[in-house]
Image (tube, grey):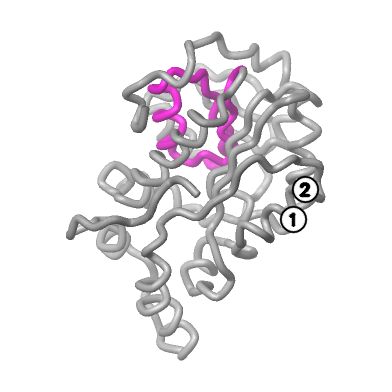
């Protein structure tokens, strides 16, 4: 069940990565790496900052619970590819729940942090640089990834071509353009979504959407008051630091933060 207590499915062998991706090789440290790695729209220090707070963060914990519940309701058939999975916080939870997980992460710090966490299969690459073959991915996770892609339609269409017939993609994205703030600029976001706008993009790129919902239902108001309004009024905000990130992610009072269901 939630948090990997109950297995989501029997564990299975990971695919032979060298057979399904043409531009990666396995290093002595156990990390698969592409021979070329492209730049991405994500700050270089972002993974290390997240790595320092993920284990104590209510936000990361609740998002994991929602992802696990979604996969429980819409099961995976085959290995799970966590694309742009950062430090492996989600990948480890899925692995602990019985899935065979391959983390695909272009950032070197994130890929190495994922190995430290115990994620068994880590590829340091973008999908393009790894050169995955068509119709080889059975399940793909894009957890707060698509908003970092300038051409989201081309990116999602490419992933569709890489997936096997009947495969599933699982996505999380930041919600509502009216919640745009400096944090989005700093994180390298191109946009925010609604369920409706994301569904439209997915359907236009060949997906059949089975389920969509919002979570963190009580957070928009504090985000609006503490981030969005100061940003729109032109108040200077400080560069994100470890202390400010910890403050944002530590839940000091126990209160409901939203359901994982529709």
Most extreme residue toward the left is: 253
The answer to whether residue 106 of the structure is visible from this angle is no
Q: Residue at x 66, y 38 (%)?
A: 126
Q: Position of residue 177 (x, y in %)?
A: 59, 71
Of the pair 169 and 142, the residue shown nearer to us? 169
Which corner quadrant of the image does residue 159 belong to? top right
Q: Position of residue 7 (x, y in %)?
A: 40, 18
Magenta range: 78-107
Question: Dot 1 lies on which element?
Answer: helix
Q: Tell me the quadrant of the picture where the N terminus can be found.
A: top left
Of the pair 210 and 42, the residue shown nearer to us? 210
Q: Residues within 10 Å of mark 1 (few under 14, many from 20)?
A: few
Q: Residue at x 43, y 32 (%)?
A: 114
**Residue that label 2 marks:** 203
Task: Kindly check if marks 1 and 2 are in contact, taking CB atoms under 8 A apart as contact.
Answer: yes
Q: Residue at x 69, y 52 (%)?
A: 199
The answer to whether residue 190 of the structure is visible from this angle is yes
85 in the magenta segment: yes
Q: Is residue 5 above or below residue 224?
A: above
Q: Is residue 183 above or below residue 137?
A: below
In this rendering, position of residue 6 left or right of residue 167: left
Of the pair 261 and 175, the residue shown nearer to us? 261
In this rendering, position of residue 199 left or right of residue 144: right
156 in the magenta segment: no
Question: Dot 2 lies on which element?
Answer: helix
Instruction: Tell me the distance, in whole angstroms, between the alpha carbons under discs 1 and 2.
Output: 5 Å
Q: Position of residue 27 (x, y in %)?
A: 55, 20
In this rendering, position of residue 160 left or right of residue 172: right
Q: Residue at x 41, y 84 (%)?
A: 230
Q: Which mark is residue 200?
A: 1
In this rendering, position of residue 97 left or right of residue 121: left
Q: Residues within 10 Å of mark 2 (few under 14, many from 20)?
A: few
């Amino acid at each position: 069940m939630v948090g990997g207590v109950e297995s989501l499915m029997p564990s299975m062998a990971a695919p032979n990565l060298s057979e399904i991706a043409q531009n990666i090789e396995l290093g002595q440290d156990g990390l698969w790496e592409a021979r070329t790695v492209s730049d991405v729209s994500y700050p270089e220090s972002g993974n290390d900052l997240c790595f320092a707070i993920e284990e104590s963060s209510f936000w990361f914990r609740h998002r994991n619970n929602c992802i696990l519940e979604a996969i429980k309701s819409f099961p995976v058939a085959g290995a799970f590819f966590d694309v742009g999975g950062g430090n492996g916080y989600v990948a480890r939870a899925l692995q602990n729940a019985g899935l065979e997980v391959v983390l695909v992460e272009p950032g070197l710090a994130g890929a190495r942090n994922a190995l430290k966490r115990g994620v068994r299969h880590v590829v340091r690459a973008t999908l393009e640089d790894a050169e995955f073959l068509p119709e080889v991915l059975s399940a793909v996770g894009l957890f707060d990834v698509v908003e970092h892609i300038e051409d989201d339609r081309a990116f999602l269409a490419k992933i569709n071509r890489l997936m096997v017939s009947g495969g599933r993609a699982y996505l999380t994205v930041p919600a509502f353009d009216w919640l745009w703030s400096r944090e989005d600029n700093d994180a390298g976001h191109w946009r925010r979504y609604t369920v409706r706008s994301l569904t439209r993009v997915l359907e236009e790129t060949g997906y059949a959407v089975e389920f969509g919902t919002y979570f963190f239902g009580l957070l928009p108001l504090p985000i609006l008051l503490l981030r969005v309004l100061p940003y729109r009024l032109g108040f200077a905000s400080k560069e994100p630091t470890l202390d400010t990130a910890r403050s944002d992610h530590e839940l000091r009072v126990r209160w409901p933060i939203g359901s994982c269901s529709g």
